[in-house]
Amino acid sequence: MRMLSGWGRIWIFLMILGPGIITSFADNDAGGITTYSIAGSHFGYKLLWILLLITVALALVQEMSARLGVVTGKGLADLIREQYGLRWTFFAMVALLVANGATIISNFAGIAAGFEILGIYKYFSVPIMALLIWSLVIKGNYRQVERIFLLLCLLAFSYVISGFMASPDWGLVVRSTLTPTIEWSQHYLFLLIAFIGTTITPWMQFYLQASIVDKGLSLRQYKYERLEVVIGAFFTDFISLFIIIACAATLFAHGIRIETAKEAAVALRPLAGTFAEVLFALGLIGASTLTSFIVPLSTAYAICEAFGFESGLNRKYREAPVFYGLYSVLIFCGAAIVLVPALRLLFVMYLAQAIQGFLLPIILIFMLQLINNRRLMGNYTNHRLYNVIVWGVVLVIAAASLALVFMI
């Protein structure tokens, strides 16, 4: 009986697997990969220690989002509208639309950069990938689309292989991860803050909660979804760790400083071999493609919830025309802008991080107010110690996010 019970729990976990893992893996987008690549090439292993703290913070925030979803059965934008009215909702949605639009552009730029490393020009790769991303969502249901997302998550492990191929000093890696190191330079502090801004973002909270509702998860599956969220938080920063390791062990060790993820992949070729370069490129393509799916969906979910339109991947186009129409506009506009020759894509990436940094503290405060509303959550509000910890996390994130806005 115990064996059957154990296998039963594993089966349930596999059935609910998706929202937490996908949201976390999509967090390592083109902007994140660029940030970690720059950190590794400019400072070696010195920034690894912050990943431990960020993992804990990410798990706490994502757990609250998951709990709100399974207890209320509603998305975050829906709850904000119900509890705080249209004025605050409109403000949050406009900021989210601008920030997510910039994020979508930066990830199509990541797709372009990844394919250019493999010798395929962006004027071919970007339109094809945009059409593929669009058609898979338009024609699929939630379960089919979720399987595609989970497969894309596997490509992120190419960075782990690249990290091992770089032959790092593992003793130094462990010491750097466990020992905080502060370098009092503006560039170091900027990257330290950028780590937070690129790891915990507003769109993640909207997507995670909306996908939990869309998948139909209930309070009975809460403990399994909580475990999935924690696992997702661990793996997203596990991948980040190896991006930094790959660049630190090769580029930093040879005094090569890069400014984009594409430069990092190309620079790996003479130091770690062509295979390492290809793996880095595939990781960039996979991560950028996954986020190019997720961020437009997150935006469409949030705006439709906020203003009462039908939404969800289990609905047909005619049942949710605003949802799919907005998704389509975001996909094709984002792809088209990347094809503009003179566009400064690095500036677009930083702009997205700045706006996300401005919006994030506001969204986290909304979440804390909602999660502690006993009328809404019943016995599933935060415990006092949990509140103390999370408010501390929110204050640090708010300070870091606002600092990032002013430093960009």
Image (cartoon, helix red, strand yellow):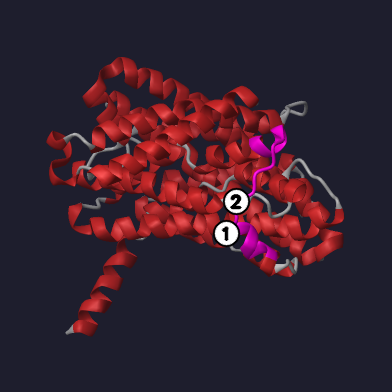
Residue at the disc numbered 1? 178
Of residue 386 and residue 369, the one placed in the foreground of this image is: 386
Q: Position of residue 195 (x, y in %)?
A: 58, 42
Within the magenta stretch, is there residue 356?
A: no
Within 10 Å of disc 2 (Cα), the crowding (few <14, some 14-19, many 20+) is few
Q: Is residue 26 above or below residue 107?
A: below
Residue at the extreme top: 87
Quadrant occupied by the N terminus: bottom left
| Residue 378 appears left or right of 400 | left
Residue at the (55%, 40%) spot, across then down: 198
Q: Position of residue 373 (x, y in %)?
A: 19, 34
Of residue 22 and residue 178, the one placed in the foreground of this image is: 178
Q: Please tell me in which quadrant of the rendered image residue 206 appears.
A: top left
Q: Magenta residues?
A: 172-189
| Residue 147 appears left or right of 334 | left
The circle on residue 180 is 2
Within the magenta stretch, is there residue 182?
A: yes
Within 10 Å of disc 1 (Cα), the crowding (few <14, some 14-19, many 20+) is some
The circle on residue 61 is none
Callout 1: helix, strand or loop?
A: helix
Of residue 113 and residue 268, the one placed in the foreground of this image is: 268
| Residue 288 appears left or right of 363 | right
Q: Position of residue 22 (x, y in %)?
A: 45, 53
Question: Tag 2: residue type?
Answer: Pro
Question: Tag 1: residue type?
Answer: Leu
Q: Main secondary structure of the magenta part?
A: helix
Residue at the (22%, 25%) spot, across then down: 83
